[in-house]
Image (spheres, rainbow, N blue to C red):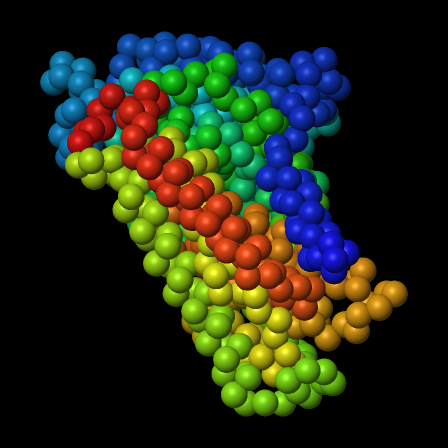
Amino acid sequence: MIARYLPALGALVLAAVLTLVATTTPWPLAPDRPAGEFSAGRAMADIRVIAAAPHPAGSAADLALQDWLARRLAGLGMTVRVDRFAPDPLHIARNIEWGSAADRPRLLTNLIAVLPGRDRTLPALALMAHHDSVAGSPGAADDGAGLAAILETVRAVASGPRPARDLLVIFTDGEEIGLDGARHFFAGNPPPVDPARDHIGALINLEARGGGGRATLFQTANANGESVALAARALRHPAGSSLAVYLYRVLPNDTDLTEALPWMATRGVAAYNFAFIGRPGLYHSPKATADRLDQGSLQDIGAQTLDLTRALLVAPALPRPAPDLVFFDLFGCALVTLPTYAGWFLLAAALVAISAIWRGRGRGRGHPRAALGGAGRMLGLAGLTTLLVMAANLVSFHVGGPNYYDRLAATPWLEAMAAAAALTAFFVVIGRWRPGRAALAGAFVPLWLMAVLLQALAPVAAYVLVLPVLLAALTAMLPPGRWGTPLAVLMAGVVTGYQFVLGHEMLQAVGSDLPLVVFLPLMLATLAILPLWQPFSRRARRVVVLGCVVAALGLALGIRAAPIADTIPHYTKVR
């Protein structure tokens, strides 16, 4: 009896293992590692200085940090220049809650440092991070991790042969009050434009929103084909996707790279933006100390930065504009790249596979009504998941409404709540269903049509639908038996594992308030599992559904009843 559930269970176990592989940060390397390696242990010594106290723009603590950073850069063999400029008065006024009038900065300071290459005429590679924190936060991650990762990267590069091209470091000021330092450097606002700007041929920016998690390549310049191809060759343990790049282009979020992109577009300069967003409760938090920073995340962002820095420094020519690539990391093991037009061929292959499922032998072959039923059941799964996730979110809100930073702190619990709501919908809609061939083919149709639409509107992001639909359809075509079942388990596990990772990343990035980030991975995982699925009995389904409802409701009420997190910034308005 239990044996019939083993294939689906095996796929889920494999999916869980792959999820852990993809989302676990690397082990931080000790300070005694060889000089050419990136060591989080060495970088942590810098973090403890940087994050010793809050250092908002213009504060005495930030002035002391600037002096320390200048000495630290000079000690690495770099020529350091201090560039002072006036902040935007509107940004200062907007951030009045961060201090009294006497605390408002009158001058901001960018630090520009150069490690000379063998050929000073070659375009330089620039590494950028911001040295100011928000008021009240030590900023160990935002952006202490970026500063320390750059310092350790420069140290590792300087320990080897002199690079071919200049390595430029830009530590900007005023990022937290409105990207002022980057705007001054790249746009000359306030004037003048920094003279080092036009020497840059490629730029890597480092950021953080939280205190842990995998470091992800989440933003590039437009026409990123050559730059992504180089990253795919250089990064040994990559994380990133063209989906993240697409979403960041359309969302109203900014980093220092935002101010650089207009100039970069006119010059065809390559750009990379890395950040980690795990432990989101530490974002702008007074608890964002060195001791709370995930050293694995520091190792991750630093090792990827060093890999990419070395590749760019030795490249005969820096990447130039080329058509955007579709890219994604395969569970942190490799960066897969595809041309955008490949999506149309994959969609055609998926349609052929779905047609083969429809025509294949077996129960329910070729019945249009059954196919409509399969499509309707998948749409019902999406609709019920949406309703349950929205209801759970409403229950979880504190009296008086949600607080943004408190919700960030509750992210792990919100993920569990959303998962319980999604499982409730799954067992209600799918729990007792054993589709025939026509119904199974019909189940693919809504997601295939969604994939076609996404391929037409956003081809760099469409892979997130196109590839799972194709692989799930191929899984459904495999005959059960000695080799077919193990291969189906493997393919279903890979597809489902990627959906687990995608759901986790999307819930961290945008929260559980957007049901799409829950029901879309659920539907794709369901397609992959369906060929292996064995229906539950009425009683078993009833028990599982009741357990999932109790879990979702209990988690929602627990989040609602919990006190406001002690990690929220002091300037946030608690309602």
151, 461: nearer the viewer: 461
Name the image quarter holding residue 197. top left
Say which quarter of the image contains residue 141.
Answer: top left
Taking the spot 54% from the left edge, 89% from the top edge, the residue there is: 368
Residue 367: image x %, image y %?
A: 59, 89
Tell me where residue 110 appears, x and y as whole percent. 36, 26
Position of 229 with respect to 518 (left or right) is right
Using the rendered image of the protein, determine whether residue 451 is visible from the camera's viewpoint: no
Residue 424, how many percent across, how many down?
47, 54
Q: How many marks?
A: 0
Judge by depth and name the residue closer to the eye, 527 or 113: 527
Relative depth, front residue between 418 and 326: 418
Q: Quadrant of the C terminus?
A: top left
Q: Is residue 517 left or right of residue 312?
A: left
Q: Is residue 228 above or below residue 377?
A: above
Q: Position of residue 334 (x, y in %)?
A: 69, 48
Question: Which residue lies at the image location 13% right of the left edge and 17% below the top edge?
Answer: 100
On screen, 163 above or below 225? above
**Residue 41 visible here:** yes
Side of 11 relative to 115 (left or right): right
Q: Is residue 353 above or below residue 265?
A: below
- At 68% from the left and 82% from the top, the residue drawn is 363
The residue shown at (57%, 50%) is 500
The image quadrant where one finds the N terminus is bottom right
